[in-house]
Image (tube, coloured by chain):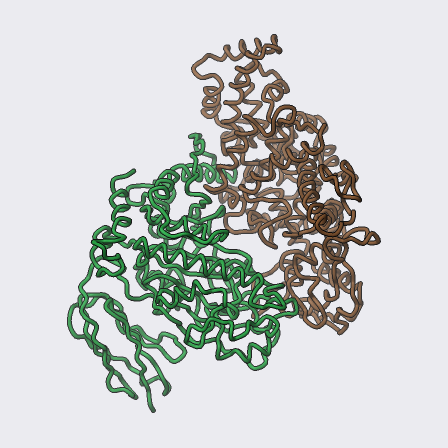
Amino acid sequence: MKRRKFIQTTGLSIPLMFNGIPMRAMPKSSIFSAISNENDKVLVLVQLIGGNDGLATITPLDQYDKLANVRGNILIPQSSLLDVGFNIGFHPTMTGLRSVFDDGKMAVVQSVGYANQNRSHFRSSDIWTSGSPAGQQWTTGWLGRHFEQTAPDYPTGYPNAEFPDPFAITMGSLVSETCQGTAINYSLAINDPFNLNPLLDFEGADPPNTPYGDELSFLRETIEQTNAYGETIKEAAESSESLIDYPEDNRLANQLRNVVRLIAGGLQTKVYVVSLGGFDTHASQVVGDDVATGNHAALLQTLSDAINAFQQDLNLHGLDQKVLTMTFSEFGRRIRSNDSLGTDHGDAAPLMLFGSCVAAGIIGDNPEIPDNPSVQDAVAMQYDFRNVYGSVMMDWFDIAEEDVKNLLYPGFSHLPIIEGCETTGTSETVPFIEATAYPNPFSKQVNIRFNSGSEHVRLSVFNGSAQELKVLVNKKLTTGQHEFSFDGSQLPAGTYYFHLQLEGGRQKTKLVIKN
Amino acid sequence: MDRRTTLSKMFGQHVSDKKVATAPAPAATAVLSGLAPYMGAFEFEQAAHLLRRTTFGPTYQQIKDAVNDGLDATLQKLLEDRPLPDGPLNHRYENDPEVPIGEIWANKIYQPQPLRNEIRNYRRQSLNAWNVELLRKSGVSIIEKMTLFWHNHYVTANINDPNYTYNYITTLRENALGNVRELAKIMTVNPSMLRYLNGRENSRVAPNENYARELLELFTIGKGPVAGPGDYTNYTEDDVVAMAKVLTGWRDVGYFNMNPDIPMPFGRYVNNRHDTGDKTLSYRFDNQVIPNMGADEYKHLIDIIFSKDECARFICRKLYRWFVYYVITDEIEQDVIEPMAQVMIANDYEIKPALDALLRSEHFFDMLSIGPMIKNPIDFVFSVLNIFEVEYNDANLEAYYRLQLRTVGQPLEQMQMVPFNPPSVAGWKAYYQEPGFYRVWISSATLPPRMNFSNQMLGEGVGQGANRAAIDVLKFTASIDDPFDPNHLIDEFAKILYPQPIPQGQKDLLKSILLPGLPDFEWTVEYGDYVNNPDDEEIAASVADKLKNLLTAMLSMPEFYLS
């Protein structure tokens, strides 16, 4: 085992209890940042394949009566839903996720989708994995493009001292399209990290510059990569252990359990992709005489139990501030159910994030169900999925906003979905003092004043529909009092918000523009 | 740079003097030849290419026969209709009152529980074993490759009743070389399809559009570029809704039929579930109105869809990706796909003339078309079994079926291609997922099972005693012309196993595996010793070991994963 990895492994796994104090209760400063002088954050993507019915997963309770009119045959009795506050009911099987939510480690972004929704599984999956607009076909993945910036020559020259481990790992047999680069996929597919035997690797002559040669090179490279990374992966998996019992017969939990072992074992892989299929519930989404059971209930239970166990395991390993988990699915489903106790392909749906660094709670408004939706109607988009991706890139991987715009789309606007954890190095923070805005209400200009330490600060203004209008500051400031002003003279009267994020805290305050 | 000169240099061989490209090639990956008939030499390399792409693992003898017969006769043989194979047998279960052991169970009724599950289980096993047998024995015919093509096209999966699956795959096999449009009609009301895409739930009161959407997007015309909201150039969202209504009213007879009057699973029309109103298609289908036509309405709908020539292009692209390569450039679209589609249209959607045109084309035999296809797992597994003519003892039916299942069951699962269970309605990703296509088969998770499979079949094989099945390297070597010269032996092995010649350095490496640190003549001596003393087990074993080392290396080289 390499020396550097050994240090990191012990660093991460020993201090479960430090002088009897559980890790999480310790001030978040020293241990992690002392180990790594660069970004050590990990993103876990959970792909829910088939198009998850968001309305049955995270049910808007204020719309319940309207839902009862149009999807009565599959709608779960209100009394059975898990009321988590915010006018939201979780599906009754999601007790595990409720405890993650109550623990402040879960964020729900409402109605995530994109304009001109495509209702083909394959096209829409391509859109979600590539981050393209609906009308364009991009063959690279949203994370693949990011890796390609860091490592344009990959796999030539990898692994190396700077990047000893795979950039991304897909748990399963197929690599994830999210990690597709122009020429090669940046993720390694792994079924069983404990059973990776080296393949015979023959050095042949350089293959000819023909289609045959291209495919031959690809095969040789994959064999070399498999061998090159195989040993480190196996070592990482074997040098750590699961600290909780995962649910049995849970195909998602099996994948996530191995993810924790790899992270805890010191693998520096940035992205893991796991998946759960079966969400294409055109028929028999529920059992007719007991609608809280059936295919969808079983899927959500699998998801909920797996994430809950995973999150606990991360907590016990002291990795909960290092790992961010995010779900995605190609689309939500129609508002109206069909006659087969199922639902057809729809549009937007809630997206879930987990971890100690998420802005816990509900982001966005409950979807509004029309009084008499047509058969074609589905949940309207509130947030473009690329704004979620981009905010993760910025706040989790420290990618500059300009780069995010290049990698995703020029119209990107940041969403406050991550808060409270340092992403880089150490920095000085000061006790959080509430910011003030004056005058408020205002008609022309408002001034926002706050104190910060030497730390990264982000201040922006949103309208009532949660669209970010302007970023007033997004950089590291010096210690002291700061003031920024916002010109609202061109805006219609109404309610607006400013959103302030400092390392020591976060604040959302209403602004009123009057005529 | 003159592409052909470079190639002939690269492979050190003469390139037949068919049309010589004079224009410089824009890129190495551009295959420029078109659908005109190939007039060049039809030698071992070309014959092997044709048989590898159209069958599962051609043998040395089959390739040599094809060279002797010539391209015309070989193509004719490949495209010949064949009678359907006999159905799968009850291989082990004693309590099926309808089907004694050794008899065909297909289309025989079920019994009440608890027998039903036991009957289902033996039939399911039997069906899978029978499928292995068909692929092992498919010989020089394109029918099994086409049957698998249609399975990947008209996908069904998770079908619980083996009678349904038998009916499904037999329908595809029966029509594999038939008429594309008529097959669309047949599959629309196929009972497995009615189950898989919810057609059976599609009714007048609550249309379920699942099948209608895939019918357009995946089965017939394909999705064009987005031309506006809900408008995919070839059809619109409104067409999906209207067509779902056309297709209302179809039910299947139900799993596990116990009624002797029902001969086999089929789709049945139920009038009071059918939407009898007029259905108006979009301007993409010329605003045609489909009046109530009851049980015949779906046929009329399929005729309307196929009246659009785009259907021929769509299916020809899929055939191209199945038989040639996944990259379709503008030139290939224009010079191969379009003329092939025109052949299909001119022949009223009969598939044989279009296939014939493709498989005898200059483009198909272009040097650049030979070798870049990554074998799918089924092709890979049956290459290993069939090239080496692995024998299975069929004296005991149960052991025979079980062993065939054991040989391929788990390996195919690990390599991600389980027959009768494609991962989604679009089929296996290798045939549609950009940009990787065939490369999807290959990952650090799926490579080890490939290597394990060939190693195992070259080594201990599967099964024991009289029922052991394994590669007999001595028998295989004896079938080669002049196996006494190690250089010639490696050349011949490479010709059989690899699509293109390998460089001398690789041959040298292989020879050092066959004969570590020994001069060539030692092989001639040792092998000659074995031939002269065929009953001396010690000599046979030591020669076999050397050959196993060589073939283990050869089957593990990525060249063997290519076709």
- Seen at 49% across and 13% down, the residue is B520
Question: Nearest the camera: B157 or A407?
Answer: B157
Quadrant location, the C terminus of chain A: bottom left
Quadrant of the rendered image containing residue A297: bottom right
Quadrant of the rendered image containing residue A237: top left
Q: Residue furthest right?
A: B261
| Left or right for A125, reference A152 | right
Residue B253 place in picture, x, y as percent? 76, 57
Question: How many numbered circles does the render carry?
Answer: 0
- Seen at 41% across and 78% down, the residue is A465
Question: Nearest the camera: A117 or B195?
Answer: B195
Which chain is green in the rendering?
A
Q: Is residue B451 visible?
A: yes
Residue A173 place in picture, x, y as percent? 49, 46
| Left or right for A337, reference A79 | right
Q: Chain B is drawn in which colour?
A: brown
Residue B48 place in picture, x, y as percent? 63, 31
Quadrant location, the N terminus of chain A: top left
Residue B349 place in picture, x, y as percent? 74, 52
| Left or right for B329, reference A356 | right
Q: Is residue B81 visible?
A: no
Residue A508, above or below A512: above
Q: Which residue lies furthest to the left in this view?
A: A480
Residue B68, above or below B526: below
Q: Residue furthest bottom?
A: A515
Residue A431, above or below B480: below
- Seen at 38% across and 43% down, the residue is A155
